[in-house]
Image: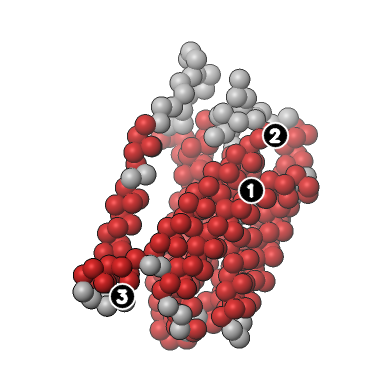
């Protein structure tokens, strides 16, 4: 996407990509709430039985596998003539440990770790605390996905109004932390569910903005490797988070997880602001090269 877009349209392109993916997930979440009942009735078992949930998981694998078809049909544009720079090699990966890349990766690790301890278990939190059924839970996650998809389209307008992607990231992520805490300690499902919807939209609308920013700060030949580095830092958090979360849930419940996740998010937001609040201005002043779609 970086290679076929200009700076003016790049933020919107990244946001549309993320938003459309999220909106399509809304239909899946809505359907998922009904599938256990349908499979349970067909198989003659309970809607919350292991067999019904196994059938749902199998259906998700088949549905996700269909996404490989359009990917297989994609034909990448080839460079017209010899490349001006050589692709990054294995020996160059050591250069990825330089401070500028590590600064971009640090917020990803903190947010990934915080999310891994809580976000995958929000369905258990809602069912355990408010005793809602699968249909209501599926509807809640479906509406959340739809709102997030719409919010990502609004993200570029916020960045444009503020004149900075980083300001938009810090503003939206910072606001989401307040709603995260409200979700965890709300006295009713209505309040908690509303906070869940707003939090998801605010937090996720910043993802394409930060992705576009990091790619703009990276030389073209390193973008694939740096993007992998950022994703790796996110995944490192997810390798540890679930184990920690399981121990905390068993001993203390969800309350400490909401607090720790909010703290990790806040630290990541603070680092993003400290590291990059002047980066965009400096890049424009220094004339950082941005690839053209020509």
Upstream in sequence: badge 1 or badge 3? 3
Which corner quadrant holds the C terminus?
Answer: top right
Residue hosting label 3: 47
Residue 59, by quadrant, is bottom left
**Image coords of residue 20 (percent x, y):** 53, 47
Which residue is at the far top? 81
Residue 197, by quadrant, is bottom right
Disc marking residue 23:
none
Q: Nearer the viewer, mark 2 or mark 3?
A: 3
Q: Nearer the viewer, mark 1 or mark 3?
A: 3
Residue 240, by quadrant, is bottom left
Q: Is residue 41 above or below residue 171?
A: below
Q: Nearer the viewer, mark 1 or mark 2?
A: 1
Q: Look at the numbered discs 1 and 2 and tell me whether their residues touch, using CB distance below 8 Å.
A: no
Residue at 52 percent across and 76 percent down: it is 257
Residue at 56 percent across and 49 percent down: it is 19
Real-space Cα distance between discs 1 and 2?
15 Å
Residue hosting label 1: 153
Residue at 42 percent across and 58 percent down: it is 28
Upstream in sequence: badge 1 or badge 2? 2
Which of 105 and 118 lies nearest the eye of the viewer?
A: 118
Residue 176 in sight here: yes
Residue 33 relative to residue 151: left or right: left
Q: Residues within 10 Å of mark 2 (few under 14, many from 20)?
A: few
């Amino acid at each position: 996407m970086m290679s076929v877009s200009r700076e003016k349209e790049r933020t919107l392109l990244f946001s549309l990509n993320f938003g459309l993916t999220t909106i399509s997930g809304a239909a899946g979440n809505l359907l998922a709430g009904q599938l256990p009942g349908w499979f349970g009735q067909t198989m003659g078992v309970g809607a919350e039985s292991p067999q019904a949930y196994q059938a749902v998981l199998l259906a998700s694998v088949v549905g996700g596998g269909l996404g490989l078809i359009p990917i297989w049909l994609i034909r990448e544009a080839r460079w017209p003539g010899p490349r001006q720079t050589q692709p990054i090699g294995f020996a160059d990966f050591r250069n990825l440990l330089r401070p500028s890349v590590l600064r971009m990766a640090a917020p990803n690790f903190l947010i990934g770790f915080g999310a891994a301890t809580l976000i995958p278990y929000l369905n258990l939190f809602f069912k355990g605390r408010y005793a809602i059924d699968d249909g209501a839970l599926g509807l809640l996650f479906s509406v959340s996905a739809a709102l997030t998809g719409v919010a990502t389209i609004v993200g570029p307008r916020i960045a444009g109004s503020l004149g900075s992607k980083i300001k938009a990231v810090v503003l939206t992520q910072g606001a989401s932390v307040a709603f995260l805490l409200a979700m965890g300690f709300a006295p009713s499902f209505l309040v908690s569910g509303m906070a869940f919807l707003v939090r998801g939209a605010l937090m996720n609308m910043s993802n394409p903005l930060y992705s576009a920013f990091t790619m703009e700060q990276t030389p073209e030949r390193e973008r694939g490797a740096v993007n992998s580095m950022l994703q790796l830092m996110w995944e490192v958090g997810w390798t540890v988070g679930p184990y920690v979360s399981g121990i905390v849930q068993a001993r203390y419940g969800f309350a400490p997880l909401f607090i720790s996740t909010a703290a990790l998010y806040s630290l990541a937001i603070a680092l993003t602001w400290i590291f990059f609040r002047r980066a965009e201005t400096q890049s424009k002043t220094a004339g950082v090269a941005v690839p053209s779609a020509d």
